[in-house]
Image (cartoon, grey):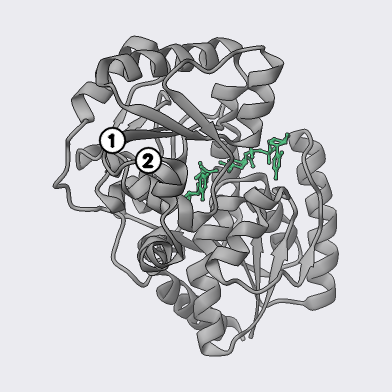
Amino acid sequence: MRFSVVLGTRPEIVKMSPIVRELQRNGDEFDLVHTGQHYSFEMDKVFFRDLGLPDPTINLEVGSGTHGAQTGKMLIGLERFFQQTEPDVVLVQGDTNTVLAGALAAVKLNIAVGHVEAGLRSFDRTMPEEVNRVMADHISDMLFSPTAVSADNLRAEGIADDKIHITGNTIVDAVRENLHLAAEKGDALTSLGLVKGEYIMTTMHRQENVDSPARMKNVLQGMEKVNQNTGLEIVWPMHPRARKNLERFQLSVPPGVKVIQPLGFLEFLQVEGNAALALTDSGGVQEECCILGVPCVTLRDNTERPETVLVGANKIVGTDPVSMADGVRDMLGRDGWICPLGEDGAGTRIVKICREFRKTWA
Ligand code: UD1
Ligand code: UDP
């Protein structure tokens, strides 16, 4: 049985890593197929290094572009690769353009598609991620939902029950497997001049936030307020999309906010896990904070991870400066929730289901 594991962006590299490890452990035949959606060292190769992943079999090097151009280039390259290698199962993860292209190229070739992290919904179709995940879910054969909430979303859209598997989220393994490695690797806090519990960590990259000068300006004002109210420094490993737009809109970062390069996964885990709070629009960071016991304030108007809000680990505040400051005040010091993202072993469960699925039509 041959697997193709498709990935293209940093969260996919992180969340696919437990599945790759499981395939390696079992001696399964697999190709790691990189679309090249992310390509800067700090958005791509650093994760292969930190997670000890093998080099991709192929990198399609599609790079950046408009949604249509980027997805189209991926489709052409992925179709060609799948035709040459004839995988039995193609696995995609999450909600990026890479996911949509991977699932679509495979299904048209009658290859079984497994969607990891299926059924998440923000119910906001203006987000490119929502469109990608809805499309990927409806053309996949195996839907690996992290929680009962995401499985219910799929059922509500009429997806057959026998395609849905509640597996937990692979991020739980990715975090737990790498926490000790992160500590062994060195002391990211000292090298960044940070003290445990005495700073707030922020990340931001969503199209709806960083492509809008008004929303970005609001967030910067909000950060200034948060810094003034709490006295906590804000450290911001800045995504290239945010950096590009900050320059384009000629906005400046307020005092009390320290901008740094995006971090590798092991350094990031240390900075995230020791923060007093995270201020973010990232999906993965909302989850990781919930796992690590760090309160999270989300700079969005909705979330496809409502479980994190329900347990009290996360608060949705949008980008209004006053709401940001109020949200941080409410969340600082919170802890004690039970992580709702599933047990360890999601990667193992997912690979096992793929093998069983193969048996039904082999
Ligand atoms: C993409 C995903 C988003 C995911 C995010 C993870 C889509 C539609 N969006 O957003 O869901 O949360 O990845 O980080 O698939 N750039 C670089 N170096 C890189 C990659 C990007 O400089 O390695 C810059 C380019 O200027 C590029 C911009 O970032 O135009 C945006 O990159 P893109 O891959 O289109 O979207 P992301 O915002 O990264
Ligand atoms: N991450 C990282 N370094 C950073 C910022 C994020 O290693 O400087 C990791 C983070 O731990 C998480 C993933 O990147 O696993 C989240 O990616 P991102 O926020 O870009 O995308 P999203 O999860 O929103 O799709």
Q: Residue furthest left?
A: 336
Residue drawn at x 27%, y 24% as measured from the top left? 328
Depth check: give the residue in front, 303 or 358. Answer: 303
Q: Secondary structure at mark 1?
A: loop
What residue type is disc 1 on? Glu
The label number, if any, that marks residue 194 in the structure image: 2
Q: Secondary structure at mark 2?
A: loop
Name the residue located 60 percent from the left edge and 71 percent from the top edge: 53
Q: CA distance from mark 1 to mark 2?
A: 7 Å
Which residue sits furthest bottom?
27
Q: Quadrant of residue 179?
A: bottom left
Quarter of image, res 228? top left
Residue 325: % across, % down: 30, 17
User: In the rendered view, does 334 fall on the left or right side of 228?
Assistant: left
Q: Is residue 120 visible?
A: no
Residue on which disc 1 sits: 198
Q: Quadrant of ligand 1?
A: top right
